[in-house]
Image (cartoon, coloured by chain):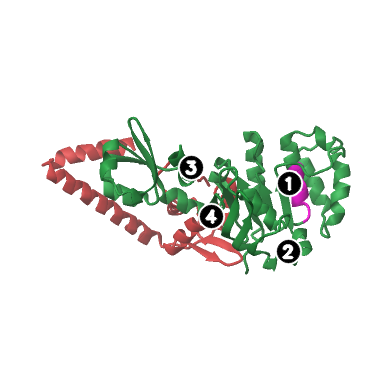
Amino acid sequence: MEPVLEIKGLKKNYKDFSLKGIDITLERGYIMGFIGPNGAGKTTTIKLIMNLLKKDDGYIKVFGLDNVEHELDIKQKIGFVYDESNYYEELTISEMKWVVAPFYKTWDDNAFNKYIREFNLPVNKKIKELSKGMKMKFSLAVALSHNAELLIMDEPTSGLDPLVRRELLEILSQVIQDENKAVFFSTHITSDLEKIADYVTLINDGEILLSLEKDELLNNYGLVRGGKELLNDVNPKDFIDIKENQFGFEALVKDKNEARKSYRDKIIIEKPSLEDIMLYHTRRYKNA
Amino acid sequence: MNIIISNQSDKPIYEQIADQMKNLIMNGELSESELLPSIRNLAKELQISVITTKRAYEELEREGYIVSVPGKGSYVRPQNKELLREARIRIVEDKLAEAVSAAKTIDMSLEELQQILRLLYEEV
């Protein structure tokens, strides 16, 4: 079966930023986390997928179809959630539903009502009166009520408290109980992905730095600490980046077993978090 | 059936799951031909990646503990319990042999070694 999302050589040029020919592939049945610092190109990529921006080069296929040529068909099967509310603030939840529902051929009112109950959403409240978490859940209820096969979410967890974020993660793992569905999820809160993501794609400055199985990343990479004198005779290629302080150094290595072999008990090796991996790759430290 | 995973452990999560399932099969808590939870359900419940649970099941299948039937699920494979036990005993023998040779390098007596073994056996 073809991938649910396939991006090849995607380019978009702005004056001060460009997406430099990125590739992303996501198969059905999986959750991919799309991480990177602010301004790395996450939202630009998502807007290009949704055809809200015009690309300069490359292609985007959703369900095997070109995303511009087949935009309407594709969007019927995409659930889209982004961090700002895109609804009429003056309408209530139930009024807003009547506006949105007719756009979808496969709108499922029962499903919608079920999610509204599950998420504890007050149907008679105006959108502007909802908390940030409620707005996100309302977007999610809409996204899940038309049998979407691909959920695309742009920073759905930013500004939400840990409780709501945890709830969202549970909903997402519920979604992929159906192995026909997939989730593409951008965030800079990497701890959300540490748990449930199957794949992690890291973007920085318009380039994909890595796109791997999350387990592979967390099991192979290592956070290394040691004394500064060690830095004189190390091969800098062994480290993705090094952060020095007065009393020693910390660095990220791609293969912790290799590092253990080369440096043995001169270093301490720990499991990195996705945040460590993101920070070391985006060279925040080097520039500091 | 309990499966408890640790995110801090150095042991990869798929291995933790596979090991625990092996134990459940060995001690009979999971019985022959019993249907296991689906990889997706297990991933959801443990809040981990589907790839992790898939990998655990693949390992269990490769080692002959379970059989996966496409479209149906994974089942505990009928085991020859004697053979399984023997395989486990061999592992114990190997580890003990290692301990013995480590003991001999420091001229530890058999009595001392037995004493340590007894203490450990009662402790763990």
Tell me the CA gap for discs 1 and 2.
24 Å
Q: Which chain is red?
A: B
Residue with the mark numbered 4? A208
Q: Amino acid at mark 4?
A: Ile
Q: Quadrant of residue A270?
A: top left
Disc sitting over residue A140 in the figure: 1
Label 3 residue SS: helix
Q: Are marks 4 and 2 in contact (CB under 8 Å)?
A: no
Magenta stretch: give its range. A137-146
Q: Are marks 1 and 2 in contact (CB under 8 Å)?
A: no
Label 2 residue SS: loop
User: As drawn, is B112 to the left or to the right of B50?
Assistant: left
Q: Amino acid at mark 3?
A: Leu
> Could you tell me what secondary structure mostly forms the magenta stretch?
helix
**Image point (29%, 41%), residue name:** A231
Residue with the mark numbered 3? A279
